Image (cartoon, rainbow, N blue to C red):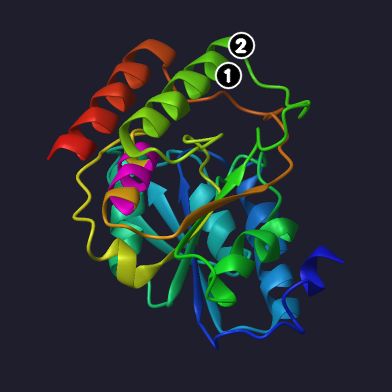
Amino acid sequence: MVRREIEDADREELSVSVVIPVFNEELTVGGIVARTRSTLEQVKLSYEVLVIDDGSVDRSAEISQASGASVLREPHQGKGCALRFGFRRASGDVIITLDADGSHQPEEIPLVLRGVVESKADFVVGSRFFSADANVQVPNVNRIGNRLFSSLVRLLTSVKITDSQSGFRAIRSSLLRKMRLKSRGYEVESEMLVKALKMGARVTEIPISFEQRTTGKSKLDPLRDGARILYSLIASYLF
């Protein structure tokens, strides 16, 4: 049912680019790419799937290509650099981002995409914490940090955001081109969100499901990356 939610709606005929940053995710990325392609085939919009390999030393790139993605390789520089590179190469009217570790469900792409396709939003965030009773299994330090950063976004922009750090999003490419993103790491999500709100973009959230990774290890350092996210939020608002 999720896949069919936008099929019968009044919608713009938009093309879609799915940009997936990858760093050593050979165990999960193949399934993510295959499920993404299957979902978009059923939505019946023109699409491309771009995997940005951020200097992986495993078989992430080869597996992604075998699964049907276009693979772009870069030296390891961080998630922000990988996404920015992907945005420059993406040809779609709408860009979707999601993680390669299996925590996001590609079958929910139509949910994230719908607001843009129906011309109700320019930027849609898939929120893990949209419902107050959402039972999401994430480390406490991540949950507390996300709550702090989302509260700061609301303080700076007067817009309530429940999941400022979510990597599952749909954004008009015309909006992205105006942002002049600079982030190199995980702070890129904060920079994108604050700059979009500053520009007066229509930003909305929708609830998504989330599964904490069960293979591999998170690359996020709560202290180092948390400090960068905090700086990016403030700098994006001030400058």
At a point 30% along the width and 39% down the height, the residue shown is 76
**Res 212 label:** none
> Is residue 10 shown above or below 75?
below
* Residue 204 visible (yes or no): yes
Segment tinted magenta in the rendering: 189-196
The answer to whether residue 101 is left or right of residue 79 is right
Q: Is residue 30 left or right of residue 73?
A: right
Give amino acid for label 1. Answer: Arg
Name the amino acid type tagged 2.
Asn
Instruction: Assign the C terminus to one quadrant of the image.
Output: top left
Residue at the spot of label 2: 140
Q: Is residue 125 above or below residue 140?
A: below
Q: Nearer the viewer, residue 131 or 77?
A: 131
Q: Magenta segment: does it hold 191?
A: yes
Circle 1 residue: 143
Dot 2 falls on a residue whose secondary structure is helix
Q: Secondary structure at mark 1?
A: helix
Q: CA distance from mark 2 to mark 1?
A: 5 Å
Q: Main secondary structure of the magenta part?
A: helix
Asked whether disc 2 touches disc 1, contact meaning CB atoms under 8 Å apart, the reply is yes
10 Å crowding of disc 1: few (<14), some (14-19), many (20+): some
Q: Quadrant of the N terminus?
A: bottom right
Q: Looking at the image, which residue is at 37% across and 18% down? A: 226
In the rendered image, is residue 55 in sight? no
The image position of residue 167, as x and y in percent, is 51, 43
State the image quarter where residue 135 is shown: top right
Q: Position of residue 129 (x, y in %)?
A: 65, 32
- Where is residue 26 shown, x and y percent of the image? 59, 43
Q: Is residue 56 magenta?
A: no
**Residue most extreme to the left:** 239
